[in-house]
Image (spheres, rainbow, N blue to C red):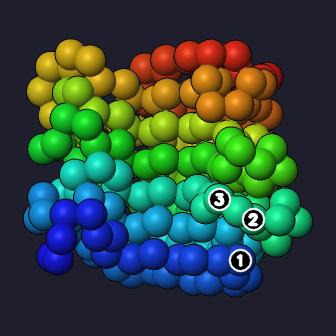
Amino acid sequence: AGPATDCMIEVHGPINGCRISNLILNGNSAVDYGMRIWCSQWGEYDRITIAACNVQGLGLEQWGGQDGSITSNNMLNRFSQISVFCPFTGNATCFYIGGDPDNLLNDSNMNTFDNIALFRHPAGKGLHIGFSDASSMRNLIVWCNGVSTTGIDVLLDGSEVTGFPSAWLFENMSGTIVCQGTIGMM
């Protein structure tokens, strides 16, 4: 399990064509992160289960200092049949999708997400979407482990970068949506 700040799998890009599939990661409530993906293009991530992480189960995000070129974005990735279980830690986010708010060229865009199941703590977050656009989410379900208090099923976070997230398509979704800040078109 290693130190609490560890991540079980990190994909540090820029990288093209990464594929991770048929995998189960169990953090045993001893690690902070399950899988973090930075600067990935044309990736395929499917049939993955991530469980019991203290901060974040799965993250599609940016690391700072990128040059803003097209290879720095998370784009054209496909996520399918993903399950993330973070029901034991109140501050945990099951799935985070965002970018680098300090460089307005580096976001997550043109990605597809199909058949995503998230199981959160009553005070945690299921899906948190920040600096991201032009993507689609189909067949999303978010469960809560008990009575929700301060938790959020789906957070559209417009406080990271004004006008984002934007241009997202949601189809067949089960979960309450909370919007904060100024978001774009959905």
Where residue 71 appears, as percent x and y from the top left, is 82, 71
Task: Looking at the image, tell me whether mark 1 or mark 2 is earlier in sequence order.
Answer: 1
Where residue 57 appears, as percent x and y from the top left, is 34, 56
Nearer-the-camera pick, 165 or 111:
165
User: Would residue 172 appear left or right of 165 to someone viewing this image?
Assistant: left
**Comparing labels 1 and 2, the label whose residue is closer to the camera:** 2
Note whether 12 is above or below 34 in the view shown.
Answer: below
Q: Residues within 10 Å of mark 1 (few under 14, many from 20)?
A: some
Note whether 45 is above or below 128 in the view shown.
Answer: below
**Residue drawn at the location 61% of the way across and 46% of the way down:** 98
User: For numbered disc 1, what is the local secondary structure?
Assistant: strand
> Do the residues under discs 1 and 2 have CB atoms within 8 angstroms?
yes
User: Would residue 31 appear left or right of 76 to someone viewing this image?
Assistant: left
- Cα distance in 3D space between marks 3 and 1: 12 Å
On the image, numbered disc 1 is attached to which residue?
Answer: 14
- Cα distance in 3D space between marks 3 and 2: 6 Å
User: For numbered disc 2, what is the local secondary structure?
Assistant: loop
**Residue drawn at the location 76% of the way across and 41% of the way down:** 133
User: Would residue 132 appear left or right of 80 to someone viewing this image?
Assistant: right
On the image, numbered disc 2 is attached to which residue?
Answer: 66
**Residue drawn at the location 50% of the way across and 81% of the way down:** 20
User: Would residue 76 appear left or right of 139 to someone viewing this image?
Assistant: right
User: For numbered disc 3, what is the local secondary structure?
Assistant: loop
On the image, numbered disc 3 is attached to which residue?
Answer: 64
Which residue type carries mark 1?
Pro
Q: Residues within 10 Å of mark 3 (few under 14, many from 20)?
A: few
Which residue type carries mark 2?
Gln
Image quadrant holding the C terminus, namely top right
Q: Quadrant of residue 1?
A: bottom left
**Comparing labels 3 and 1, the label whose residue is closer to the camera:** 3
